Amino acid sequence: MEESFAVHFEGPAFASMSISPFAVGQSLCALDGLVRRCARIAGGQVNGHAGGHECELDVAGSARPRSFTFSLRSPAAGTVAGLNSLLQLGTWAQGKRVSVLRREAASHVLVENCHGDVCSWNRTAVAVYTEARTQSLLSRFTHTLDREGAERIVMTDGAAHTVCIGLQERCFFRHEDGLVLTDNEHVLVLEVLAAPLKEKAEDWRFSDGSCAFSARVEDETFLAAVTEGTIRLVPHLVLCAVVRTVQVQKMRLTCRRSIVQVREILCPQSAA
């Protein structure tokens, strides 16, 4: 099934072409991740790994300045509508988690946001939105708006439905205090140095062979496997993972890392 949508960046910095291409590139990379997760919404897949349904996403420059046109091929129709729903849900929830009150129908649940407002929403969109990985991608997608002169990211689908993310929405989606200088992901081989007593996301320690660091584990599938005993935390456990690194300028420069996806257990094989 083929779908298309366009993303347009607005603001004086984009008009004068003084925005960093690296910042825009990181937003587009995060958008790619969001689209792949939204394929799960189209397929009604409440539970699943970060990739969700397989899909192909191509991007091209648009005749409209500062715009990009995306062509999407996925097994199920409605991936772009799922992305719209996800962004709208995040805005309504002001970037915070929502509470599910009850299931209303086969595909919808009644949810409550942080202000006590209640609304019916697609249950798969709610499940995808509340995952830590989705929260990270929303923050990465909108972090370009932290740059001076960047004002809005506007997304339009083939049916002329428009979602606008401005500076107010960026305040909702950003999870770092201060100016985000860099926000990127890369694949590393890591050794687990320490894990929390309970299989929670915080308090993990890793080494990449040159330095040790603390990181939050956002891969719910990995955490669930550790909890269930499918993956055992044995000494010298080495894994291949996607690591997100965020540098933030406040009073001083800070760096935060998170493990967004564990791709493979490398050794010992008995741990997996």
Image (cartoon, helix red, strand yellow):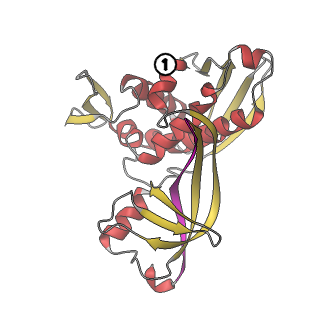
At x 77%, y 33%, the residue is 21
User: Which residue is outermost to the front?
Assistant: 251
What secondary structure predominates along the stretch shown in magenta? Answer: strand
Quadrant in the picture for the C terminus:
bottom left
Label 1 secondary element: helix
At x 51%, y 57%, the residue is 259
Query: Compared to 243, does 106 lie above or below?
Result: above
Image quadrant assignment for residue 188: bottom right
Number of numbered tags placed on the structure image: 1
Query: Compared to 73, does 243 lie above or below?
Result: below
Residue 112 in sight here: yes
Image quadrant assignment for residue 72: top right
Q: Position of residue 192 (x, y in %)?
A: 49, 72
Residue position marked by numbered label 1 in the rendering: 168
Residue 77 in sight here: no
Q: Is residue 263 left or right of residue 48?
A: right
Q: Position of residue 35 (x, y in %)?
A: 56, 39
Q: Identify which amino acid the numbered label 1 is placed on.
A: Gln
At x 53%, y 41%, the residue is 137
Toward the viewer: 126 or 91? 91
Q: Position of residue 243 (x, y in %)?
A: 58, 56
Q: Is residue 224 left or right of residue 242?
A: left
Q: Is residue 41 left or right of residue 198?
A: right
**Magenta segment, which residues?**
250-267
